[in-house]
Amino acid sequence: MKDLTFLKWSYSSSSSGGTYLKSEHISGNKKYYYKLPDFKYGRFSGCETAIEVIVSRLGEYLGFPVLKYTGEMARIIVDGREYETYVAKSLNFVKSGYTAIPIVTDYLTNRLAKTESPLDYCRRIGLQEYLDYVFMLDYLVINDDRHGHNIEILYDRDNNIVPSPIFDNGRSLTYQYGNNVRLMQNWDYKSEITVNNFVGSLSLDKNLEKISRSYELPRLTDEAYRKIFRGLERFISREHKEIIRTALDYRYEKMRNGGIIL
C-alpha cells in the first residue's frame, strides 16, 4: 500500500454529480500528476483511475502514442479523512523549452477562417496520423469525452508542432459502473455510441471513416490481457475484467472486419 497522504488534492466537478480530485508533486527534476476515481457522498464510487491505466497499457501494447499511466492502491487524505483507493500517476510530458496549448485554443487562434473545422485544421498542421490513433483508440475503449482540452499541441523553441501523447482516457469502457458487475450486464458496448468529441464527430463509428489508412496492429492475446490487467486484482474484479475484455475483443474485430486493422 503506497503512502500518498502528503499529497494535496484539488477539486473539479464531474457529470455524475461527484468530484474528480487531482494533485501534482515534484520529485527531483520531474513533475508527476496524480488523479483519483470519482468521489461522491464521501466515498470513491468510480473506477476511472483503473480504466486510465488499462487504456494506457492497451495503447502502449498496440503501438499508439499514449501517455503512460501507472497505478497502485494508496492511502490518501481528503478533507482531513484518510481513504484507501486506486491512484493513477503520470509524468509531465511537456519537456523543457516546449509550450503546451489545448487543441481548442490553438484552433481558435490559428484557423484560417471560421469555416475551417477542427478536423481540417488538424489535418492542415500535420496531425492526420496522430488523429488516426486517437480515433482508433477512442473507438476501441468507447471514450466518451475527447473534449478540446484533452488533446494538446506542443510548440518547441522554433515553433515546430508536436502532438501531445494521448491522455485523459479514464471516461472509457465501464467507468460509469464503478465495479458493479450487475449494472454492467446491461452495458451495450456493441451499439453506436454518441460522445463528446472536439475534433471528430459525435459518433465513434463515424470517426473511423476519418482514418486515413489501414494499420497493422498486434492481436489481443491472452498474454496481452495479462499485461493490461496486471496488478489490478484489488480494484477490478475478475468478472469486471472479463466484461472489459469481451467489449475490447468485439470492437477490435469490428475494426478488422472494416479494414482499418490489418
Image: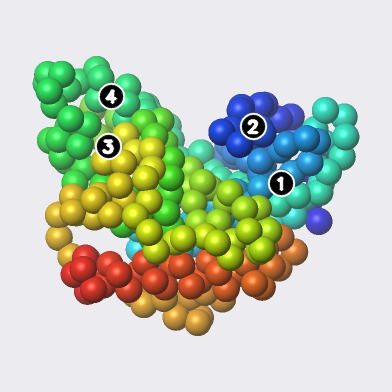
**158 and 69: which is toward the camera:** 69
Residue tagged by mark 3? 199
**From this viewpoint, is residue 119 visible?**
yes
Q: Which of the two discs, 4 and 2, sits closer to the camera?
A: 2
Say which mark, if any, is on residue 17: 2
Label 4 neighbour load within 10 Å: few <14, some 14-19, many 20+: some
Label 2 neighbour load within 10 Å: few <14, some 14-19, many 20+: few
Residue tagged by mark 4? 106
Q: Which of marks 2 and 3 is nearer the N terminus?
A: 2
- Placement of 113 over or under 88, stated as above or below: above
Residue tagged by mark 1? 45
Amino acid residing under circle 4: Asp
Q: Locate residue 63 relative to residue 206 in the image: left or right.
A: right
Q: Which of marks 4 and 2 is nearer the N terminus?
A: 2
Q: Which of the two discs, 4 and 1, sits closer to the camera?
A: 1
- Measured in 3D between alpha carbons, the distance from the residue under mark 2 to the one under mark 3, in whole angstroms, is 26 Å
**182 and 84: which is toward the camera:** 182
> At x 35% / y 69%, what residue is drawn?
252
Q: Earlier in the sequence, mark 1 or mark 3?
A: 1
Answer whether labels 2 and 3 touch (C-beta < 8 Å).
no
Instruction: Give the quadrant of the N terminus.
Output: bottom right
Label 1 neighbour load within 10 Å: few <14, some 14-19, many 20+: some
Q: Earlier in the sequence, mark 3 or mark 4?
A: 4
> At x 79% / y 41%, what residue is drawn?
43
- Measured in 3D between alpha carbons, the distance from the residue under mark 1 to the one under mark 2, in whole angstroms, is 11 Å
- Measured in 3D between alpha carbons, the distance from the residue under mark 4 to the one under mark 1, in whole angstroms, is 35 Å
Amino acid residing under circle 1: Ser
